Amino acid sequence: DAGVIQSPRHEVTEMGQEVTLRCKPISGHNSLFWYRQTMMRGLELLIYFNNNVPIDDSGMPEDRFSAKMPNASFSTLKIQPSEPRDSAVYFCASSLYRVGAQPQHFGDGTRLSIL
Amino acid sequence: QQPVQSPQAVILREGEDAVINCSSSKALYSVHWYRQKHGEAPVFLMILLKGGEQKGHEKISASFNEKKQQSSLYLTASQLSYSGTYFCGTEIGETSGSRLTFGEGTQLTVNP
């Protein structure tokens, strides 16, 4: 079975440019999570969706960040305008939302560098 | 509230044992354990629910002490492949469906 698929794997762009990260969750999973990982801040949750609805976006740093999940098989995380401090590895994870804790399955991540 | 992991780092020789702890100041519903190798994504190891259960996965097992709100990950007879950073993720509250908050990680190095 295919795991969580993220694209692009690497992104290098200049400050001020718009960046769009993409995620395809595991088929059948109805929870989707966006994380950011840096040396300074570790692995932090940005936003998560249950059944395509954003549940908690308290981790989104500021208005420059936005996330959408138009359907069960696709989500985007957009940064506009991008800044050097946004450089990080961004992970998407999915799980099956139901009674009882369920494991999250992570994609390979997008390594983002803002120059 | 971010859980606290200890130790921050540990170095072992192949075959030695290690314990990694994860503590929370909040009442937990579940504790998740993940391992991340350098340059790769975190990989799920196991989940423990409140109730003090213990789980095992080959030579890696874990426990959850609900009274202390603490989970421990036990690695026995460590192998070179166990090297990586171990994260605990905690879910607070009475039911599932809330966010996971990850600790800062414990870097484990297993040498020959």
Image (cartoon, helix red, strand yellow):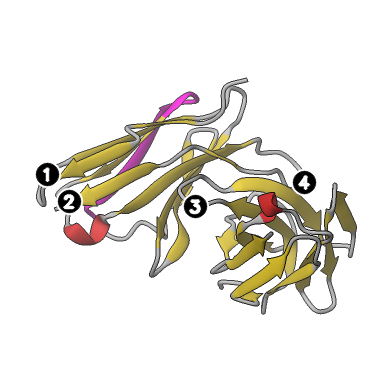
The residue singled out by tag 4 in the image is: A100
Asked whether the residues under the numbered discs 1 and 2 touch, taking CB atoms below 8 Å apart as contact, a structural biologist would say: yes
**Amino acid residing under circle 1:** Gln
The residue singled out by tag 2 in the image is: A82
Element carrying mark 1: loop
The residue singled out by tag 1 in the image is: A17
The residue singled out by tag 3 in the image is: B38
State the separation of the CA atoms marked 4 and 1.
Answer: 41 Å
State the separation of the CA atoms marked 1 and 2.
Answer: 6 Å
Element carrying mark 3: loop
Instruction: Say whether disc 1 or disc 2 marks the residue closer to the N-terminus.
Output: 1
Marks 1/2 same chain: yes
**Amino acid residing under circle 2:** Ser
Quadrant where the image shows the N terminus of chain B: bottom right
The residue stretch that appears in magenta: A63-74
Question: Relative to residue A56, is residue B92 depicted above or below?
Answer: below
Q: Nearer the viewer, mark 4 or mark 3?
A: 3
Q: Check residue B102 in the rendering and tell me which mark sits there, or answer none.
A: none
Asked whether the residues under the numbered discs 3 and 1 touch, taking CB atoms below 8 Å apart as contact, a structural biologist would say: no
Instruction: Say whether disc 4 or disc 1 marks the residue closer to the N-terminus.
Output: 1
